[in-house]
Image (cartoon, helix red, strand yellow):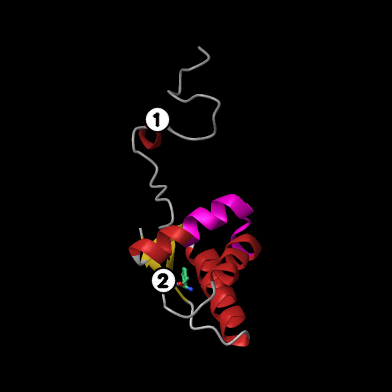
Amino acid sequence: MADKDNSDDDGDVGLALKTRPKTKRPPLYKVLLLNDDYTPMEFVVLVLERFFGISHSHATEIMLTVHKKGLAVVGVFSYEIAETKVQQVMDFSRRHQHPLQCTMEKE
Ligand code: TYC
């Protein structure tokens, strides 16, 4: 007679277990670096190391991809983190008077 009232011990009722909980993951955003003709290559590598925690050799590869292809994704983040990275790169570049552009785009 442990189950005579058609309930178990998990604190909810049978019907609720049959509906899938709606746990939509938050959208992710790609952070993109754009090529230009003026920003020094070493500065772009420094940006990738400093703000994205990327190693010197990988940063050099990404920088060269941007240089050749025009742009590259440097990381994928939640909205707030992506927004912060873009701001940090833009602020740092402006302070050093480089025209480097960094943007974000929903994945
Ligand atoms: N094209 C730049 C140069 O030749 C280098 C560069 C690479 C600039 C990547 C921006 O996102 C960039 N000095």
43 shown above or below 52 = below
Disc 1 residue type (three-letter): Gly
Task: Judge whether residue 98 is colored magenta.
Answer: no
Residue matched to label 2:
34
Quick check: is the Cβ at mark 2 less than 8 Å away from ligand 1? yes
Q: Is residue 81 left or right of residue 29?
A: right
Q: What kind of element bears circle 2?
A: strand
Front one among 39 and 3: 39
Q: Is residue 31 left or right of residue 53?
A: left
Looking at the rendered image, the disc whose residue lies closer to the viewer, 2 or 1, is 2
Question: x, y percentage for residue 42?
Answer: 59, 68
Look at 44% across and 33% down and name the residue there. Answer: 13
Look at 41% across and 58% down and name the residue there. Answer: 65
Residue 102 shows up from this direction: yes
| Residue 16 placement: quadrant | top left
Look at 63% across and 60% down and name the residue there. Answer: 49
Magenta residues span: 51-63
Residue 77 shows up from this direction: no
Front one among 27 and 87: 87
Residue matched to label 1:
14
Question: x, y percentage for residue 12?
Answer: 49, 35
Disc 2 residue type (three-letter): Leu
Q: Determine crowd level at label 2: few under 14, some 14-19, many 20+ residues with C-alpha closer than 10 A.
A: some
